[in-house]
Image (cartoon, rainbow, N blue to C red):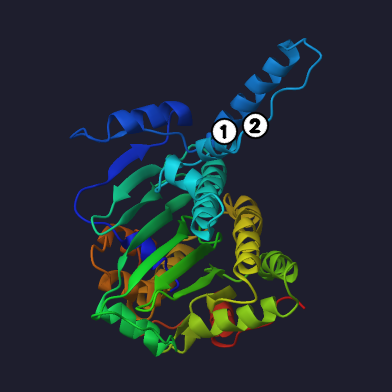
Amino acid sequence: MSQLLLSAVRAGSGGRALRCSCSLRAARALHGSSSRSSQGRSLLMAAGAAMVAGLAAGYSHFQRAEMAPRSLPPVSPQGELERRCEGFMAPPVSGLQELQAHRADMKTQMELLIMETQAEVCRALAAADGGATFIVDSWHRTEGGGGVSCVLQDGNVFEKAGVNVSVVHGYLSEESILQMKSRGKNLKTKDGKLPFCAMGVSSVIHPKNPHVPTIHFNYRYFEIEEEDGNKQWWFGGGTDLTPTYLNKQDVVHFHQTLKDACDKHGAGYYPQFKKWCDDYFFIKHRGERRGVGGIFFDDLDSPTKEEVFQFVESCAKAVVPCYIPIVEKHKNDSFSPEDKLWQQLRRGRYVEFNLVYDRGTKFGLATPGSRIESILMSLPLTARWEYMHSPPPDSKEAEILNVLREPKDWVQ
């Protein structure tokens, strides 16, 4: 499931599109007051980091003003959770009360992680873009759950950037069950039904400049309950890079950052998941990979739930440092019309993979209450297909093609 299938699940018109241009606390008030309005649109700020800094400054001022020689009362777990949620792009899907009531549950831990990851990435992208605004769309799924989709279009640096969160539950469709069984899952259904809970964060970022690569990442948690009450769980995800032109220094930085995150949890993780990524993002009918790889894994359910979660958390935290330095390095590079044409042709390949092979796209379309806008969020605004196009030998366009046809080991 390379594109987060789960962010695609929503029914009808339960969404509210919000633009990021005011403080998060004020936005939450607007968000709540407009949830039943026919307009259902209010404003949020993508650069929520400034708000967090403001809160921290206010708290420091309070501490300086407190002259009594006694320590402040301890922060309650509920207050800690509320403050953590204030940094999100929108209120959590499950709601504060439910999260607090199940604070130790893995589903709660994962929802907090994906909401936090969404906010961190959106703020980093907004800062790199220099004036970008995200449409923040909180949506509800009739069959159970909902999500938050954050999308930027026509920014200064990014043509299209989407960072989606979904937290959904209900029953898997027969097609989805068959897809899981084809991957070796032994699932016991009751009357053909299988209750599930799934959540994750998924993102695809398409820059304007051909010298800034596209990036995709997603991290997810899946849980099902079988007929006899037995529960199965697993994690999946990955991060991969798709440059238009090859810059070896950038690719090494990208892979090294991911390797460092993996190595904290096991020396074998990076080489295993790097190969898995190269194999998964393969456009069979073209005989080439979608990009220069990264890491990819699915159905990860050992050694323990907590240990796998910590590994996923490290990978999610590596997204900003593995990508944003590359954006800053190249976002002002000059480029020619020929460079832009090659970018459009490579984007055509990106579209081909997502629509023909991507497991997440197929799963999302097969899930009841699918939200088409979120499923197709990964597609670029523009792409191009030319009949029998072939770059000249020894050109910089041919250089990247050679790498896509024969994956390389970028770090040791």
The residue singled out by tag 1 in the image is: 79
The answer to whether residue 395 shows anywhere in this view is no
| Tag 2–tag 1 contact (CB < 8 Å) | yes
Please count the marks in the image: 2
Q: Quadrant of residue 3?
A: bottom left
The secondary structure type at the circle numbered 2 is: loop
Q: Which residue is most to the front?
A: 228
Tell me which corner region of the image, top left, top right, bottom left or bottom right, holds residue 348: bottom left
- Label for residue 153? none
- Can residue 400 be seen? yes
Q: Residue at x 60, y 26 (%)?
A: 55
Mark 2 surroundings: few (<14), some (14-19) or many (≥20) residues within 10 A: few
In this rendered view, identify the residue nearer to me: 256 or 138.
Answer: 138
Q: Is residue 189 left or right of residue 183?
A: left
The crowd level at tag 1 (other Cα within 10 Å; few <14, some 14-19, many 20+) is: few
| 171, 345: nearer the viewer | 171
Which quarter of the figure is the N terminus placed in? bottom left
> Is 191 left or right of 57, judged from the image as shown?
left
Q: Amino acid at mark 1?
A: Gly
Residue 260's quadrant in the figure?
Answer: bottom right
Task: For marks 2 and 1, give the CA distance.
Answer: 6 Å
Identity, as a three-letter code, of the amino acid under mark 2: Val
- Name the side, left or right, on which 267 lies relative to 388: right
Across and down, in percent, residue 394 comes to 59, 83
Q: Where residue 115 appears, x then y in whole percent?
A: 49, 49
Asked if 150 appears above or below 256 in the picture, the reply is: above
Tag on residue 75?
2
Rendered location of residue 230, percent (x, y): 44, 76
